Amino acid sequence: MTTYALIRLLHVQIAVLAMGLVTAGAILSRPSSGVPAVALRPVVRWATGGFVLMIASGVALDTFVAGALHRTTWFRAGVALAIAAGVAVGISRRVITSAIAGRLDAERARRRLSLALWIAFAFIAAAVIGMVVRP
């Protein structure tokens, strides 16, 4: 296995795990789950770490091919969507912090958290489709 193949494998595994964490957070933030928004703090923290690692492994992939990837539109779009999803996860972290500090009531925090995580999910799904289809 080449170094590029290993980095690509790690990139895909990290992306799957980050997507799983975001999906779990979005599902658990629904009112029917009964899980308080503040209980999702570890899930959102791990998702944040997943995004950092995903971007870092994407940069490593581009480095191994001497920058050939960042010249393509699908790669740029994927990076932009991953960053946008990371911003949505960052907003969800802020919502949880506000709920813990008492600046946001539980129901409003749940709605905002759910919305932010579903938006992150949509951005990641779009990035994955773009990375697989490569128009």
Image (cartoon, helix red, strand yellow):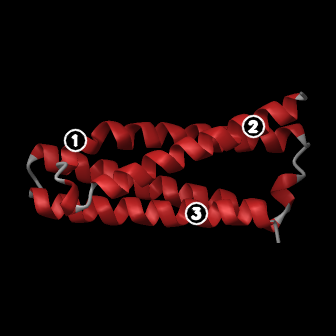
> In the picture provided, is 11 more to the left or to the right than 37?
right
Which one is in front, 81 or 30? 30
Q: Residue at x 81, y 66 (%)?
A: 134
Residue type at mark 1: give it. Ala
Secondary structure state at the residue bearing disc 1 = helix
Near-viewer residue (27 or 68): 27
Other residues around mark 3 within 10 Å, as few (<14) / some (14–19) / many (≥20): some
Furthest toward the front, the residue is: 32
Q: Which mark is residue 39?
A: 1
Q: Locate residue 1, reporting x and y percent.
A: 89, 27
**Can you identify the residue that label 2 sits on?**
9
* Picture coordinates of residue 12, whole percent (x, y): 69, 43
Name the amino acid type tagged 3.
Answer: Ala
Ranked by sequence position, the earlier of labels 2 and 3 is 2
| Sooner in the amino-acid sequence: mark 1 or mark 3 | 1
Per the rendering, the mark at residue 62 is: none
Residue 125: assigned label: 3
> What is the C-alpha distance between the residues marked 2 and 1?
31 Å
Residue at the extreme bottom of the image, as rendered = 135
The residue sitting at 9% across, 58% down in the picture is 105
Is residue 29 placed above or below 44 in the rendered structure? below
- Residue 11 is situated, as x and y percent measured from the top left of the image, at 69, 40
Residue type (three-letter) at the residue carrying disc 2: Leu
Q: Quadrant of residue 71?
A: bottom right
Q: Earlier in the sequence, mark 2 or mark 1?
A: 2
Secondary structure at numbered mark 3: helix
Residue 58 as seen in the image, left or right of residue 71: left
* Contact check, label 2 and label 3, Cβ < 8 Å: no
